[in-house]
């Protein structure tokens, strides 16, 4: 009988711990996210959506000089201003041949800026919160982790977008050579 009582207590303890975590989110990250989303929407209104659209159109130009704009700056701006899932619509300004590399970069961008800009992908905030809890438990600074993750993320999305583009070009060339 004591075993069943302990089992019931442990079972209800899981929900109690979940409730405490939920209260922590309500009093911690959720108000910050709401304020940040409001600030981002205000910033979009101040800058003007047409200016952001012009950056997207410029990133679709030919040449290696446009790779950082296309595969690092544009995905970040799209994720920052439009958030998940609307950010993917920014790819509409790119020529068809660049969309595959761009979407790879944009999907990856949804993960790395969360430590600094949690509004980008609210669904991933729980993953970041778990990692941050572990880092804090070790006595380390999560701001350092967030900045390193953020900066290394830009390098990763640039490499991924460029490689995906190159692989796509090679595959389409092979397909067109077989048809000819």
Image: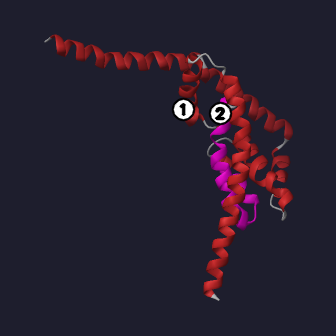
- Residue beneath the point at 69% across and 59% down: 163
Q: Is residue 79 among the parts visible in the rendering? A: yes
Q: Which mark is residue 127?
A: 1
- Residue beneath the point at 74% across and 35% down: 41
Q: Which residues are magenta?
A: 88-116
Q: Are marks 1 and 2 in contact (CB under 8 Å)?
A: yes
Q: Earlier in the sequence, mark 1 or mark 2?
A: 2
Q: In the rendered image, which quarter is residue 33 located in? A: top right
Task: Pick the quarter of the image with the C terminus.
Answer: bottom right
Q: CA distance from mark 1 to mark 2?
A: 9 Å
Q: In the rendered image, which quarter is residue 154 located in? A: top right
- Residue beneath the point at 77% across and 49% down: 74
Q: Nearer the viewer, residue 53 or 172?
A: 172
Q: Position of residue 114 (x, y in %)?
A: 65, 33
Placement of 3 over or under 173, stated as above or below = above
Q: Position of residue 78 (x, y in %)?
A: 73, 46
Where does label 2 land, which residue? 114
| Residue 91 is inside the magenta segment | yes
Q: Would you say 10 lies left or right of 155 here?
A: left
């Amino acid at each position: 009988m004591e075993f069943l009582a302990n089992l019931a207590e442990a079972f209800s303890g899981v929900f109690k711990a979940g409730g405490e975590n939920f209260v922590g989110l309500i009093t911690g990250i959720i108000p910050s996210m709401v304020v940040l989303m409001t600030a981002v929407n205000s910033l979009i209104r101040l800058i003007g959506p047409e200016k952001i659209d012009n950056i997207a159109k410029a990133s679709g130009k030919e040449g290696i000089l446009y790779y950082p704009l296309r595969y690092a700056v544009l995905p970040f701006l799209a994720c920052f201003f439009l958030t998940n899932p609307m950010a993917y619509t920014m790819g509409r300004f790119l020529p068809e041949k660049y969309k595959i590399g761009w979407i790879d970069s944009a999907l990856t961008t949804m993960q790395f800026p969360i430590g600094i800009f949690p509004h980008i992908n609210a669904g991933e905030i729980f993953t970041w919160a778990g990692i941050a809890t572990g880092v804090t438990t070790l006595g380390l600074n999560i701001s350092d982790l967030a900045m390193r993750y953020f900066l290394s993320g830009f390098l990763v999305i640039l490499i991924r977008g460029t490689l995906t583009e190159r692989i796509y070009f090679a595959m389409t060339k092979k397909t067109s050579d077989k048809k000819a």
